[in-house]
Amino acid sequence: MQSKMLRLLQWWFMFLAALLPLGWISYNAWIFNLGADPAKTIVDFLGQWALHFLWISLALTPLKHLLGWSGLLRYRRMLGLYALFYACLHLLSFATFIVGWRWDLLLQAFTERPYIFVGATALLLMIPLGITSTKGWQRRLKKRWGQLHSLVYLISLLVMVHLIWLIRASYFDAVLYGAILAWMLGYRLYLKRRQLQRRRGTAAAGS
Amino acid sequence: MLIKKADKIKPSEITSESVYLNRRRFMQGLAGTAALIAAGSARAIPEYDLDSDLPRYPGPDWLQGLLRASEPNAAFSSQEDLAPYHSVISHNNFYEFGTGKKDPAKNAQNFNTDPWKVEISGEVDKPGVYNLEDIVKPHRLEERIYRLRCVEAWSMVIPWIGLPLSQLLKQVGPNSKAKYVEFTTLQDPQRMPGQRSLFSSLDWPYVEALRIDEAMNPLTLLAVGVYGNALPPQNGAPLRLVVPWKYGFKSIKSIVRIRLLEEMPKVTWNETAPREYGFYANVNPAVNHPRWSQATERRLPSSLFNPNVIDTRMFNGYADEVAHLYAGMDLKKWF
């Protein structure tokens, strides 16, 4: 009973903590504290937090293996959904604050700007993952569910390309997030190889 | 001298004779009063209402008098709304002080720009290392209101104070071999933290250049002040270029060297990404940056209720003054 209470508290804590970036940027927009170009500041900030949540949700597996942190794994769905949530806000704020819903500009942005196209593709691919993130869908799709959700690796690579194509004066963000992503994906490949080797090993021992 | 071409005057702008005569009589009556007012007005630059909680930059003693004596140049003005002072001093691209828009205002405050020397060399009659004071003092400073269009597709309207670059160049006497003017920003990683960054895509020092006829064009300004005061360090103190028909990155900041050259020099952004940034970098809505459109711009400050998207104009609206410089050139090729 007590542990159930604790879990509920934890859940609410995580749920509310993930809303803090949104609260922070909204508050600063409200008090006009976002400088001369609040539009750009908001769009960049929301995009960055979409990336943070995606990266955190991808970090959980390696962290579990390396440090034994499995507690957070329970929140992977929530974190992934927050990545989708912030990515949607990122796109909406771009359309609203940067292009002011001028359809000609918007269409042009999506068709002629490769970095926007790539970012939009990543967001588009996240939507089916968000929809099928429930337990019901997990049950219904069975093995397919895992296959579908491995799209997240492709999505993270698209996000990375989106980020690299935005570089102007500093490689810092691209190097930082790129190195983390390389580590997270590389670690999965390593796990997979070891798994295969082990299976082969047991198969050989069995014969 | 800017000469307004006859074809720019619309018939509706021409005053009818009766109004003209009436006005003349009215003015005659006022003449005496006007003379009195003119004698009393010491300063023609408007007293800007700068927010009292923001820093001001009075500049070194020798400059203060020159700034006070400066006058607006009506030929280089604008009816557009000025970007507010706080936007002008807090939204800067000056990668020597960091890559964020707010970084320069944060990191440049202790950047001391007095004394300051400028080397002038190359194809000139009077090369040398000059004290900034000695270069600027012989000139009358003027205020000009220019649109500044950043290559990132935002823009501001800014009241600069400075002198035409052509005046300075005449002072040092370019010789007949001088075809280009190259400018170099200070390189001093101790004082410019951005130059210590391991992740910068730019090689220091920052270099920009103009063709000699661009440099001699009356629009090209060497600024020492903005908003009635000296330049803040984040805006390129103590001496910067302002070339309003080109993307902002051509308007190089904190200049320590001006060289007159026979050959086209290498310039920083063009070296960094030649597909994206040309030598000319003229504002041109018909030639997009490979990664974004240049057809429109966001006039800052924008608000969340209005993104303030406006159409970008050829040569940033200065076509009458500069289009002839590029007659016969394919501007899609020479972007």
Image: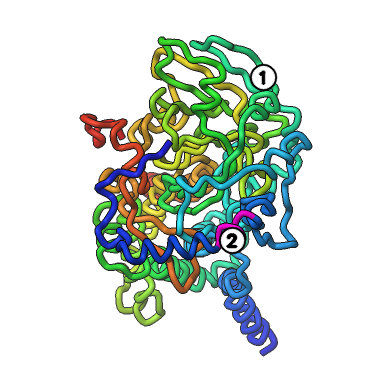
Q: In the rendering, at what x and y percent does residue A68 appear?
A: 62, 59
Q: Is residue B22 left or right of residue B231?
A: left
Q: Would residue B89 be visible to someone looking at this image?
A: no
Q: Is residue B180 visible?
A: yes
Residue at disc 1, secondary structure: strand
Q: Chain of mark 2?
A: A
Q: Height in image: B281 above or below B43?
A: above
Q: Secondary structure at mark 2?
A: loop
Q: Who's the residue at 35% across and 48% down the image?
A: B317
Q: Which of the chains bears the disc numbered 1?
A: B
Three-letter amino acid code at disc 1? Answer: Tyr
Residue B17 spot, x, y in % from top left: 31, 62
Q: Residue at x 52, y 42 (%)?
A: A175
- Residue found 70% across the figure and 27% down from its top: B133
Q: Could you say which is closer to the camera, residue A123 or residue A155? A: A123
Among the 4 quarters of the image, the one containing residue A36: bottom right
In magenta, the rendered stretch is B30-35
Q: Main secondary structure of the magenta part?
A: helix
Q: Is B162 a magenta residue?
A: no
- Residue density around tag 2, few if under 14, some if 14–19, many if 20 or more, within 10 Å: many
Q: Could you say which disc has been placed on residue A164 in the image?
A: none
Question: Label 1: which residue?
Answer: B130
User: From the image, which quarter does the N terminus of chain B lie in?
Assistant: top left
With respect to residue B42, does B303 lie above or below? Answer: below
Which sits in the foreground, A198 or B180? B180
- Amino acid type indicated by mark 2: Gly
Callout 1: 10 Å neighbours few (<14), some, many (20+)?
Answer: some
Q: Nearer the viewer, residue B292 or A171?
A: B292
Front disc: 2 or 1: 1
Please give left or right for residue B92 compared with residue B283 in the image.
Answer: right
Tell me the number on the disc at residue A35. Answer: 2
Q: Position of residue A78 (x, y in %)?
A: 50, 73
